[in-house]
Image: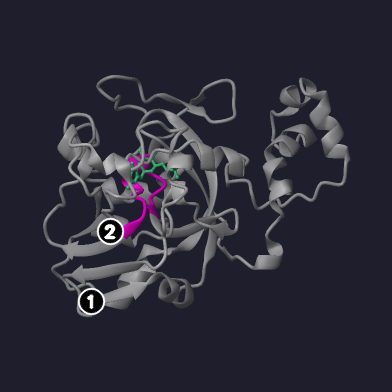
Amino acid sequence: MTHLFKSVPVKSYEITPKATYLSRRDFIKAAGVIAGSAALAACAPSLVEESEADVPFNPAYVDELGDPANTYEEITSYNNYYEFSTNKEAVKSLAENFNPRPWTVEVYGLVNKPRTFGIEDLLKLFPQEERIYRLRCVEAWSMVIPWQGFTLASLLNLVEPTSDAQYVRFETVYRPEEMKGQGSAFYPWPYNEGLRMDEAMNDLTILATGLYGEMMPNQNGAPIRLVVPWKYGFKSIKSSVKIELTNERPNTLWSTVAPNEYGFYANVNPDVNHPRWSQASERRIGELSRRETLMFNGYGEQVAEMYADMNLQLHY
Ligand code: MTE
């Protein structure tokens, strides 16, 4: 299997100062680094000037398709996090006082070595790698995000799943005092998600602890959240406190609320429309025109095999 992503340990001295990466996306466009960006650059003379200045540029912040990462500002101010609000622009300030320390993640169920990990243990036990992934929300917008974290497989291998384990269930923290959205009776809190065992063990599946070389911002799921880049964003559950290995397919929050709209698999698929909108294209945050949505969000080479025997029209 080929690995199309960058997988490098993040060292603090390699991390670009925030002021630099905030403008990197503009810089990339201006410099014409990305094929097809010349027109954009031509429309933005002020950005061309910026490119001529001595702006340090870390080419790592481009995904394997050549798409530049979204800015830190974009990634941290437009968030889906219903525990705080259904208003994406409001999440950032409402999550400001959320306290991600102390934090534990309990890993239990069908495993030989159940264990509760403190967040510090997780950061020490597993080398943090950088993964620049596309995130495609089921609502048809997308971003490119430079996460750091470690593979879910490395954590699961440590607790030794038994041969009966077929699924992994994830649960977000329940703190209605701090997370006012959890007061809404419309959703079955706490937020739950699940993966099949082979999906959980796939090398693309990570537990992310930060982005752009910084600790995970509260609004993005501090201190630790799942990232499954070939599935719609709602599978990538934030602020996880429980990881359970089970032999039953977990009920997930979204498939409970609207089973005909949000299936268990939720693989990005331009050929299967949401009942209320098309999934054929998407709006990349920061871009003017829409782009075509890619099957498995462009990660087919690494994941398509897992679904070879399934009718993806039925198992959405
Ligand atoms: N996890 C929890 N606990 N609560 C949520 O509301 N929203 C999901 C997912 N994880 C959500 C969640 C959805 S719909 C998306 S698109 C992504 O988080 C958004 O992640 P981001 O805000 O880091 O871009």
x 45%, y 58%: residue? 208
Q: Give the range drawn in magenta.
A: 226-240
Residue 41 visible in image? yes
Write down the quadrant of residue 230 in the picture. top left
Residue wearing tag 2: 198
Sequence-wise, the earlier of marks 1 and 2 is 1
The verdict on label 2 being within 8 Å of ligand 1 is no
x 82%, y 46%: residue? 55
| Residue depth check, mark 1 versus mark 2: number of the one nearer the observer | 1
Q: Residue 315 carries which label?
A: none
Amino acid on which the number 2 mark rests in the picture:
Asp
x and y percent of residue 215 in the render? 53, 59
x and y percent of residue 139 in the render? 37, 29
Disc 1 to disc 2, how far (Cα)? 20 Å
180 drawn magenta? no
Q: Horizontally, is 295 left or right of 69 in the view?
A: left
Residues 30 and 95: in front is 95
Q: Which mark is residue 114?
A: 1
Q: Quadrant of the N terminus?
A: bottom left
Question: Label 2 crowding class (10 Å Cα cut-off): few <14, some 14-19, many 20+?
Answer: some
